[in-house]
Image (spheres, helix red, strand yellow):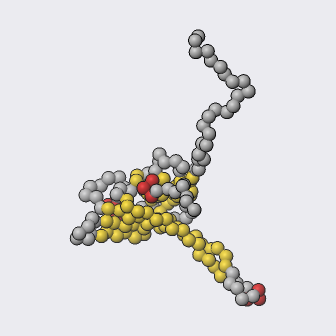
Amino acid sequence: MVVADRVKGMLLNVSINGAPLQCETSADFSYSIEMLPATNPNEGRWRNFIPGVQTWSVTVNGNLLLRSLGADFKTLVESAKSGEKLWLRFGTMQDVTPKYAIEGYVYPSSLGLSAPVTDLASWSVTFQGLGEFKTDWAEFGMVLDNNPAPAAWPLIYDANE
């Protein structure tokens, strides 16, 4: 089955406090629910669970820049050191439709910097979500027939007038 409505990763980005992360190469959103045991031994041999605590995180990888531009690795390290709470948005770029975004407060929970001798220096950061995340999306259906609706009486214009 061919799916025509796939979204390319380059149309999505991560922004921190309204500024896009610079030189981002990939981003991953993760959401999990702790499943608590709720098995009653008198009801048979099958285990049962109920949903418990929920958690979410976003991991971002990028290339290191020589100078600071907006939200970059340097600003993430400084905010992690100071314990600053950040507003994260992971979703489609502002001009892309349909729009899709996951937003919420986060703390940088781990940061890494890699400097291979034969390749570009890169960084990675994992943001731990604080509380519930919000989603914002809109789907716009394709216009299949853009002709005007049929009228009861057609308009006829005389080009000679």
Side (left or right) of 124 relative to 105: left
Residue at the farthest right position: 42
Q: Give the x, y percent position of residue 131.
A: 55, 64
Within the image, what quadrant is residue 110 found in? Answer: bottom left
Task: Note whether 45 is above or below 96 in the view shown.
Answer: below
123 left or right of 153? Answer: left
Most extreme residue toward the top is 161
Q: Nearer the viewer, residue 6 or 126?
A: 6
Picture quarter containing residue 111?
bottom left
Report the front residue among 10 and 156.
156
Give the left or right position of residue 4, taking residue 118 as reference: right
- Residue 1, above or below 11: below
* Residue 99 to residue 119: above or below: above
Which residue is depicted at the point 25% across and 58% down?
A: 66
The residue at 73%/85% (across/down) is: 40
Q: Is residue 89 visible?
A: no
At x 67%, y 33%, the residue is 149
Quadrant of the image containing the C terminus:
top right
Q: Find residue 20 and report its horizontal and vertical position in percent.
A: 40, 53
Percent position of residue 33, x then y: 59, 72
How many tags in the picture?
A: 0
Quadrant (top left, top right, bottom left, bottom right) of the N terminus = bottom right
> In front here: 106 or 32?
32
Q: Is residue 46 visible?
A: yes
Q: Nearer the viewer, residue 40 or 117?
A: 117
In the picture shown, does residue 8 fall above or below 155?
below
